[in-house]
Image: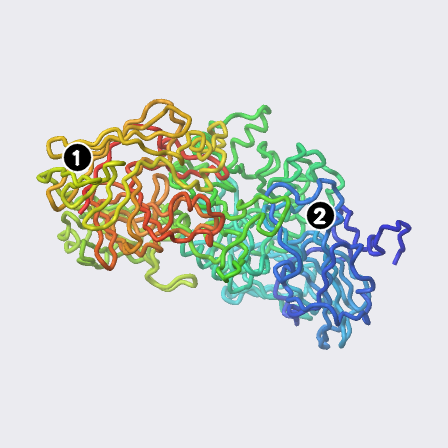
Amino acid sequence: MEVSTDLSASRYNTVVDLASPGPDTGSIRPRARFDSGLPARSLNGTWRFHLAASLAGAPEGIEAEDFDDAAWADLPVPSNWNLHGHGRPAYTNVVFPFPLDPPHAPDANQIGDHRLDFDASPDFLAGALLRFDGIDSAGTVWLNGTLLGTTRGAKLPHEFDVTGVLRATANVLVVRVAQFCAASYLEDQDEWWLPGIFRDVTLLAHPEGAVRDVFVHAGYTADGQGALRVELDPPLPWARVTVAELGFAADLAAGGPAVNVGPVAPWSAESPRLYGLEITTAVQTVRLRVGFRTVTVAAGQLRLNGRPLLFQGVNRHEHHPDLGRAVPHERLVRELHLMKRHNINAIRTSHYPPHPDLLDLADELGFYLIDECDYESHGFEEAGWEGNPSADPAHRDALLDRMARTVERDKNHPSVLIWSLGNESGRGENLAAMAEWSRRRDPDRPIHYEGDWASTYVDVYSRMYPSPAEVELIGRRQEEPLADPAQDAHRRGLPFILCEYAHAMGNGPGGLRDYQDLFETYPRLQGGFVWEWIEHGIRRQTPDGVSYFAYGGDFGETVHDGNFVIDGLVSADLEPRPGLLDLKAVIAPVKLAVDEAWAVLEVRNAYTFADLSQLAFTWTVTGPGGVLGSGPVEVPATAAGERAAVGLPEEATALRAPERVLTVAAVLAGDQAWAPAGHEIAWCQQGSPAAPVPEVTGDAAPVLDGALVRLGPAAFSRATGELAEFRGLAIDGPRLNLWRAPTDNDMGKDWFNEGARDHEGWAASRLPLLHGRLVSMRDDGGALVVRVRYGVPVDRQHVDVTYTWLSDGDALSLRAHVLPSEGWGRTWARVGFDLRLPGALRDVSWTGFGPGPRYPDTGYAQRLGWFTADLDELQVPYVRPQENGLRAGVTALALRGPAGGLEFRGEDFGFTARPWSQAALAAANHTPDLVPDGFVHLTLDALVHGIGTASCGPGVLPRYRLAPQEAEFRVVIR
């Protein structure tokens, strides 16, 4: 080993070479991952581990076979070491957590040394490869004291030829892993910085004459034939290719044209048909699963097997709340089953190739993949993209290597439809070179990259987070033109996708239906990928053992991006958020509608390929007492893209009446790998659960009683005019509320509205400080009329509310008239009325939309009906607490406890009920911060502001905004 003359340097500086901008060293050329038919041995398990704060402080001599590691710790591999008690995680979105000083890593650069002793059976001694599927960030590998090489590209495979180095017994494998290196400037990927050997380590038998690589081209022709071409490396003209199920067998012709294998069932996400293919040589039998399909871009559309696709997709990072990026296989299976159950048909592997098992599962279960290269240099934007690797010749080899490793590993998977060059990496010739290399190597797949809007070297026009208005212009091919007419014509002829949209952070995303309507209207718009699938919370516990999810800053990071890592349709524990349920409803592949007479069901098959024979249809009629009738609906096997109108059974039609709801559902007719028979795919409703609002005549009259005014069963405070008691229950309110505990989207910058942040506008208007002054309280012919002026400190603007109360001695009616002055801000969060009730009123029932929350631009999954819940069940435990849990379209609400309760009746209102105040909700940083205060805090809403997606993207769309306005609210209490 060369000794440096730099007295400050580690003697390992040269060999680990952390400042090199180039690719790895010592590994074999990248190739596909496939079942070689030869022995393989997993080296996953317990390794010895040592952590040093820097390379200078790391132990010397670790590569020696006789190095004494007895004092080292044990560490499971795969793993991220800072989730096993060694160091701490750190999160940034855009910025680097170290100085932007390429190609240098910081001195504070943790070094994790790993050692493993193992034996090798004779199967491996005639030739073997050592494969690492993922090392973050830079690995240096020795076997039996021999340097094998280094790894670069954390989420990419590296294989080393260990023939002649491997022995039968007492092998010593040593891997030194640096958390940061020059390659870290290519891996700024909006996730936790988690170092370690986090994917599998495998020993592969590879004797002389073994197949090094295979590339299977399996196309589908317009007349339903399979076109098969197989490339072997090295060429083996005596190899025999067999597809037994097709009765096909032939000797491999090196470099020959595709062979017609006869009629085949094509592969698609809706019908993921796979055929077993074997390649037999003198040394082995290689096995692959092949799906016949053809991807093209024609007439401005991306097509699969000749038909235009609609991506109903999500972006997926790899994350586990306890294990980081070392995601167990069974967890991955759960994730993909959950996606299928929610009608998701596509995944963008943001922002790197996933664990290879995902590709196998996507082939088998049916997903369309955008397979993204392990590349993002977003942090260079902070410096105006100066020195950006995309435009730096010094990084070209590394970037081409990353692209090659992506394409070569995954090229045999039918689920991979599109190669993506990376994410948010600016512009530059290196990206064009990556595209050119990919197109030469695999001309059958389109190229994607969003970061260069000119789109000169890609086959798909892709954007992130445009507004629906802009998306519509693009759908019409009327978008803002590029300055170069040739570039503009090229881009205007491309299909369009949203590689990211509907930022699912906290309460939201709002506006899913608005985007989907555009996708289904304009053929150029071929869907999108919601950001993102999973929240990246890391599980921690309070000192008293209460679990919660941590985010940026919770581990003492000096530079971090807070809870921006908590954005997903499912929690870190894979619990669906309301947004996932909404997405399922919006993207349902079967569209259903029932006429008002309950006589005809309209069905539109929105699948691309599948008919409706895989589904069964049911009807159910419910009333206040439960289910009144149910049965099947006979729907023909309607072809993809076609419509059908079918008569509903007479027994369903006969049940039509007030306070009844008909629900028609499309469910799986048989078991699937991802869900059992009866799993619901789509639904629609007709009817209404609403009962007439009781009339309150006003027979009772207000009566003075000391500090109170009594009206029927109610008592009001003469000091505030507010309700103090109803039927013996202590009540405090109603009190006007124009605010809510800000959601993540309320706190975001609306890109399309001058960067406005709703919560800042509300804070500037001092909405959280709204309080009332009793103006008058009088008897108006038996009605108790209370006038209150609500204002905020410092400012003159106000809201006058007139509360008119009537009682017949049994019930109490309220009509509230809200009249704002001028001078308020752009929006209010709500026009609502707060009441504080006894904490024992925990049993909640309501009529309206449920069982989950619904806001003006969310809640598409919620149905009309009759619902019950415990108070805790009304809460959505977002990782950063915020406004949540609104039930909407309510006509009846009851809260009860052991000693009774009260009921509210109205025509259309919303409510939230919580065991803590809105102020406490807003002040909380994590779920354990929310502690019940002994009361039920009820808010009845007349009007509500939408949710939007301003955490990253458009804010609340105009038709869902709540501007300050005059309003009426009516409710009957009994």
Instruction: Tell me where residue 169 appears, x and y as whole percent.
Output: 76, 77
Identify the residue at image location x=47%, y=56%. Answer: 366
Amino acid type of the residue that numbered disc 2 sits on in the rendered structure: Ala
Q: Quadrant of residue 175?
A: bottom right
Identify the residue at image location x=18%, y=37%. Answer: 805
> Could you say whether the residue bearing mark 2 is in a helix, strand or loop?
helix
472 or 858, which is in the foreground? 858
Residue designated by label 1: 784
The 10 Å Cα crowd at callout 2, few under 14, some 14 to 19, many 20 or more, is many
Q: Which mark is residue 183?
A: 2
> Could you say whether the residue bearing mark 1 is in a helix, strand or loop?
strand
475 or 619, which is in the foreground? 619
Which numbered disc, 1 or 2, marks the residue that appears first in the sequence? 2
Instruction: Tell me where residue 373 appears, x and y as whole percent.
Output: 62, 48
Amino acid type of the residue that numbered disc 1 sits on in the rendered structure: Leu
Number of labels in the image equals: 2
Residue 718 relative to residue 673: left or right = left
Q: Residue furthest left?
A: 699
